[in-house]
Amino acid sequence: MAGPTGDVLRTDLVRALCEQWGLPPGRPAASSVPWTSDPHATPLAQLSRWAAGLHPDDIPCRVLKLAASQVLSQVASIRAGLEHPLGRMLISAFGHPVQSDPRAAAGVLAALGSWLNLDDTAYAGHLSNSTVAVPLAYAYARRLDGLSLLTAVVVANECAARITAAATLGPLRGQSAVHTHLAGAVAGRLYLERAPAPLWENAFGLAFAMPNWPLMRAFLASDARLFNTFTPVRTAMDACDAAEAGLRGASDIMEHQDGFLARFATVPLPEVITEGLGQRWHTETLSFKMHPGGPGIDAAVDCAMEIHRAIGPVHPDDVEEIVVEASLYTLFAGRRAARYVTGPGSPLGALVLDVPYPVATTLLTGEFAVEDFSSPRVDERRRWQLADRVRLEHDAEMTRELFRSEAPFGEAVREAGPLATPWLRDFGGDELVELVGEAEPGERDFSRSTKATGARVTVRLTDGRTVSRERLIPVGAAGPDTRARHSQLVREKFLSVGGPSEVADSVGRLHRMRARGVQRWVEAALMD
C-alpha cells in the first residue's frame, strides 16, 4: 500500500545516493529553475531557453547517477563496435573515436555504438548514440570536467527524447527514428560550448530542415546500417557550425503545417516537447541494453539463459519445437527481419533484429554476445538448425502490458488519447485498438517508469519434457530492478566486452573528475 512509509523510503534512498556521490543532501528532487511556458514562443524556442540555462544543481542526483551509468553502458557498446570487423572498416574510413577533432570523433562514436543494437533506449528513442557520443567527443577534445559531461548528457537526453516523443506515433520507430540524433547531437554539443539560447534555436531549426529518413531495404540488407546515427550526427554538427556563423533556422519547424511533425508523425504531439521541463526527466525512462540485438529480443534471451541454466545445452536433435511468445512489437520487428535472415551470411542489419537466432544461440551456449554476430560463431550449423525450430506467437497480455508502460509507445498513446486510434489500428489492427482500450492518464513524472517488452520461451523436448520461462521486464529495462541496481548492471556489461575494471570502478567518481581525469578515463575506456 502506497503511503508515508513508501515516501520516507524513497526520500532515504535519494539522500543515500546523494551522500554516496558527495552531493549536497538538499539537492532538489526537481529543478529549482523557475520555469513557465511562454504561450508566444515556439516549442523549440522554449526548449532552447530551458536547456541553455540548465545548471548541474538543477538536476536531481538520481538522474545524474543514471547518466553516469548511461555513459559507461554506451562506452561498452562502442567497445563492442570497435571489435567487430565492420567497426574496424569504419575506423579505417573515418578515424579512431578518440581523436582531437570532436566533430569527426562524434560521428565515429555514434556509429560504433549503434549498429549492433547494444545501445540504450528511453522514452523516447535510442538516445545514447548521440546524447552520449557527442558530449564524450567534445568533453575529451575541449578538456572539460566530468560534471559538465554528465550535465550535457542529461540535457541532450531531455531534448532528444522530447522531440522524438512528439513524433513517436508515426511511421518511424526505434533505430529507424534517426531524427532523434539531430536533436541529441545539437544539444550535446551546444551545452558544452555554453551557447546562448538563440543559437540553440537556430541550430535545431537548421538540423531539422532536411531530416533523415532511412530506407528499410538499405537498413536491413546492407552495411548502410552503420550510418543510421553517423549521418544525422554529422548533419547536426554542420547545423551548429552554420548557426554559429549566423545562419537562421525556422523556429516553428516542429509544429508548422509544412514542418517536421507534419511529415514524420501520424499523430503529432508538439506539446510534449516542453511538457514538465525541469520536473519530468526522460532520463529516468532509460533502459540499459544487456544483449545485442532487438527490439524485443532481450526478455527472450533472458528466458533462454534461465532455461540453459536449468537443463544445460539444448541440442537440435533433442528439440521438438521452441515457442517464443511476445508482444506485437517484437513480432513486428522479427517478421520484417525474417525475410532477410537465411542462415550463415545473412546481412547483419537484419540479423540483429532476428529472434530465432539469438534464442537458439543462447539455448546452446548459455549466453548471447556480440561475437555471435560474426564468424566463426555465426556460421555454426547447430545454431541454425535450432533456430529453424523457433516459432513466434503473439501474446495479447504482453501487448497490453507493453502499452501500459511508458516506453516505447505507451506514454505517447496516453498523451494522444482517442487521437491515437488510427495509429494503433495501422500498427496492429482492430485487435490492438481493443487490447489497449481507453488509455489511463500517465504519471506526472517518470520516476516509476517501465518498459515491459516481455517474452515467454517454451522448449518442448523430444523426450516429452517441457521447460518454460517468462519475463515481463527484461534485465536492464526501465523498472524497479534497474532503478535499484543500474550501476551494477552496466558494470557487468562493460566488463563483458573486455573493458578494464578500473574504468568501471571509477565511473561513480566521474562527476568529480577534473578535465585531465576525464581524458584519462576516456583513453583507458576506449584505447586499451
Image (cartoon, rainbow, N blue to C red):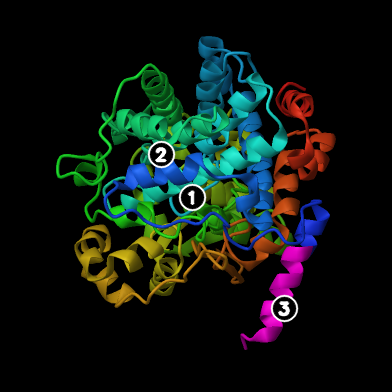
Q: Residue at x 63, y 54 (%)?
A: 63
State the residue in front, 272 or 302.
272
As measured in the structure, the alpha-carbon distance from the residue carrying label 2 to the one carrying label 1 is: 10 Å
In the displayed structure, 509 sits above or below 95; it is below
Q: Which residue corresponds to mark 1? A: 356
Q: Position of residue 370 (x, y in %)?
A: 61, 36
Q: Earlier in the sequence, mark 2 or mark 1?
A: 2
- The answer to whether the residue labelled 2 contacts the one labelled 3, judged by CB atoms less than 8 Å apart, is no
Question: Which labelled disc corresponds to residue 8?
Answer: 3
Quarter the N terminus occupies: bottom right
For numbered disc 3, what is the local secondary structure?
A: helix
As measured in the structure, the alpha-carbon distance from the residue carrying label 1 to the one carrying label 3 is: 45 Å
Q: Quadrant of residue 485?
A: bottom right
Q: Which residues are magenta?
A: 1-15
Q: Quadrant of residue 152?
A: top right
Task: Name the residue type under label 2.
Answer: Val
For numbered disc 1, what is the local secondary structure?
A: helix
Q: Position of residue 328 (x, y in %)?
A: 36, 61
